[in-house]
Image (cartoon, grey):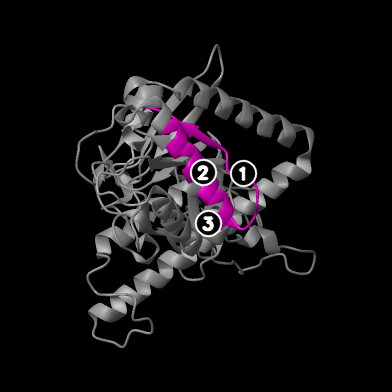
């Protein structure tokens, strides 16, 4: 299956049917009067969130959708048939945006949620509607109104509780394989993960949370380098970030410097996203002696706390995903965290409203960043002057910006 997370479409609602001009004519009934019926309403275009879908690939090549129009009215006060609504099924987590105004029309976050994205035209009136004591033989009718026409952009953001963040080969795919049934590709070269992977982590009976593994982030990802610009948007739906850091990088670089670089890229991409709760997870502890790994993790955490400016200690964990060492404690703490947040939002409605506002702010920031990069890229390719020298015409392809085709792994 192909994975597509952004597509443009055009929708056309149906036109309302025209009213009928007719008079009753039957034997032995002179001057029967007007009996022209109304037309039918035009069909609307509706989006329906379907739990069986996890990609927008169905809209990759078919991008124009038209709802049927209403039928005209008939004599004997017969009303025209209403146009059937055109229902388009999309994955849960799809955001609908007006491409002309950048207005967010709807956000489908629940199974079965419906959003009318283009309303059908209103029916026309038959001449029977215009009869009165002074106008007994009206010859007036009205046509049906046109249905709405919209150019839209559908954006899919995977619904997950926890997002994994880190450099390529930091151990994200190995971790999600260790704690869930997901089987993403794992290899000893960068950018092994080219697509988002979802895994459901079960902690005890009937307790679970969803983890999203996105491709690794490199320096310059906020400006389009690597694959970060395409998939960082999926982290805006998560409640908690796990920042995976290789405790002993093979190139000898500083883990603390790598962690600061990732946080800086995240802040440039979305300042609100960078303020989300984020736990440090030091990976590949099996490559060092236990005492050395513990000492190194403590030193890195202390250094990051000192340079963060907040003075607060950074929650951190030391794990070896390949040996499943430390993963149970991590999953238990994540589950406790998620349950506490859910209970707090149920008990205090203002907390749920605040969370919704934060997610909306993150998505607006991400949308603005992607739009800016797209404009810069197209300007560079067309030979126009580019306002920001940081962008080059080789950083982002149209397919990367518009949502390219790759395979997806989605394990429940």
What's the distance in space between the residues labelled 3 and 1, CA to CA?
A: 28 Å
Q: Quadrant of residue 382?
A: bottom left
x, y percent for residue 74:
52, 52
Q: Which residue is mark 2?
A: 301
x, y percent for residue 272:
58, 57
Q: Earlier in the sequence, mark 1 or mark 2?
A: 2
x, y percent for residue 115:
55, 47
Q: Label 3, secondary structure: give it.
A: helix
Number of numbered discs on residues: 3
Q: Label 2, secondary structure: give it.
A: helix
Q: Earlier in the sequence, mark 3 or mark 1?
A: 1
Q: Quadrant of residue 246?
A: top left
Along the viewing direction, whichever of 240 and 281 lies nearer the viewer: 281
Q: Tell me whether circle 1 and circle 2 mark residues in contact (CB < 8 Å).
A: yes
What's the distance in space between the residues labelled 2 and 3, CA to CA?
A: 30 Å
Of badges 3 and 1, nearer the viewer stands: 1
> Which label sits on residue 363?
3
User: Relative to 102, is 408 on the left or the right?
Assistant: left
Residue 20 appears in the rendering:
no
| Rendered residue at 55%/22% (across/down) | 332
Instruction: Specify start and end residues of the magenta stretch as a single range.
Output: 293-320
């Amino acid at each position: 299956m192909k994975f597509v997370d952004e597509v443009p479409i055009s929708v056309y609602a149906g036109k309302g049917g025209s009213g009928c001009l007719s008079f009753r004519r039957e034997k032995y009934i002179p001057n029967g009067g007007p009996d022209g019926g109304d037309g039918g309403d035009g069909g609307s275009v509706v989006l329906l969130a379907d739990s069986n879908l996890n990609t927008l690939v169905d809209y990759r090549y078919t991008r124009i959708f038209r709802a049927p129009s209403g039928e005209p009215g008939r004599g004997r006060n017969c009303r025209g048939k209403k146009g059937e609504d055109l229902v388009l099924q999309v994955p849960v987590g799809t955001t609908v945006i007006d491409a002309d105004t950048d207005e967010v029309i709807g956000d489908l976050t629940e199974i079965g949620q419906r959003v009318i994205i283009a309303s059908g035209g209103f029916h026309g009136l038959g001449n029977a509607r215009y009869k009165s004591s002074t106008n007994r033989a009206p010859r007036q009718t009205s046509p049906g109104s046109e249905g709405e026409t919209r150019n839209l952009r559908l954006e899919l953001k995977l619904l997950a509780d926890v997002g994994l963040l880190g450099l390529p080969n930091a151990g994200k795919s190995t971790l999600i394989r260790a704690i869930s049934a997901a089987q993403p590709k794992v290899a000893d070269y960068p950018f092994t993960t080219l697509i988002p992977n979802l895994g459901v982590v079960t902690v005890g009976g009937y307790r679970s949370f969803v983890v999203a593994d996105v491709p690794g982030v490199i320096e310059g990802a906020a400006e389009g380098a690597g694959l970060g610009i395409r998939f960082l948007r999926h982290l805006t739906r998560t409640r908690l970030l796990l920042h995976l850091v290789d405790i002993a990088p093979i190139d000898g670089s500083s883990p603390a410097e790598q962690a600061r670089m990732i946080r800086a890229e995240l802040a440039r991409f979305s300042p609100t996203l960078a303020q989300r709760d984020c736990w440090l997870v030091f990976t590949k502890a099996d490559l060092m002696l236990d005492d050395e790994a513990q000492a190194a993790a403590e030193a890195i955490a202390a250094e990051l706390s000192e340079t963060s400016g907040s003075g607060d200690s950074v929650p951190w964990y030391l794990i070896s995903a390949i040996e499943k060492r430390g993963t149970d404690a991590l999953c238990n703490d994540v589950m406790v965290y998620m349950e506490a947040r859910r209970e707090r939002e149920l008990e205090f409605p203002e907390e749920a409203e605040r969370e919704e506002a934060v997610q909306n702010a993150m998505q607006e920031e991400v949308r603005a960043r992607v739009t800016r990069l797209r404009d810069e890229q197209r300007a560079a390719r067309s030979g126009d002057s580019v306002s920001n020298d940081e962008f080059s015409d080789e950083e982002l392809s149209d397919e990367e910006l518009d949502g390219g085709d790759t395979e997806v792994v989605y394990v429940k």
